Amino acid sequence: MRRFIRFTILILLLAFIVIQFFRPEKNSDGVSSNHIFSQEKVPENIQILLSGACMDCHSSNTNYLWYHQISPVSWMVDDHVQHGKSELNFSEWGTMDIFEKITILEEICQETERKSMPLKSYKLMHPESKLSEEQIAELCDWTTKLAESMLKKAAGK
């Protein structure tokens, strides 16, 4: 029995070492000219808020921590990033039409008010991403004002 346990531990350790060679590609394209920070006048407090709570999964530039390098954690992080970017990618803001942007701005406010964003799993690993009621109000105020200005621009006012 003892021999079986040693053999099992050895196989698991070997498997853990082998999977380290199979890591997903990193999400690090940097900030492009289509990024929301390049396209819009985003106040510094909102930039800090978005960077701390949203950009890792919703842009083409993820800030990886040391444990993100270890498989299978790297696979889970990659899955979150790919899913997040498919929903909203702030790095592609300049390529979206004005009505899509307005819809996204409304959704940002709704998702944060419902506290469904950032994800609970992300907040566990990144305590600084937890948004206070005041931060949520600031974010919603900014998204509303930006959406209104876009709507006026679209109407030609």
Image (spheres, helix red, strand yellow):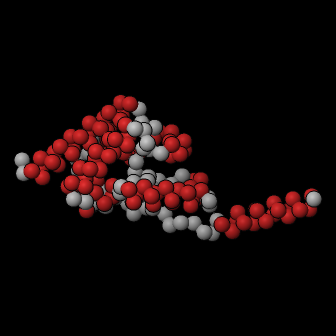
**Could you tell me if residue 5 is visible in this image?**
yes
Q: Nearer the viewer, residue 100 or 149?
A: 100
Q: Nearer the viewer, residue 31 or 85?
A: 85
125 to the left or right of 21: left
94 to the left or right of 62: left
Q: Residue furthest top?
A: 134
Residue drawn 51% across the image and 59% down it = 79
Residue drawn 53% across the image and 45% down it = 121
Q: Dividing the image into 4 quarters, which one contains the N terminus? A: bottom right
At which x and y percent is residue 145? Answer: 21, 40
At which x and y percent is residue 89? Answer: 35, 57
At which x and y percent is residue 13? Answer: 76, 62
Residue drawn 17% across the image and 49% down it = 150
At which x and y percent is residue 6? Answer: 87, 60
Residue drawn 23% across the image and 49% down it = 102
Relative to 63, residue 15 above or below: below
113 to the left or right of 128: left
Q: On the image, which quarter does residue 83 sit in? A: bottom left
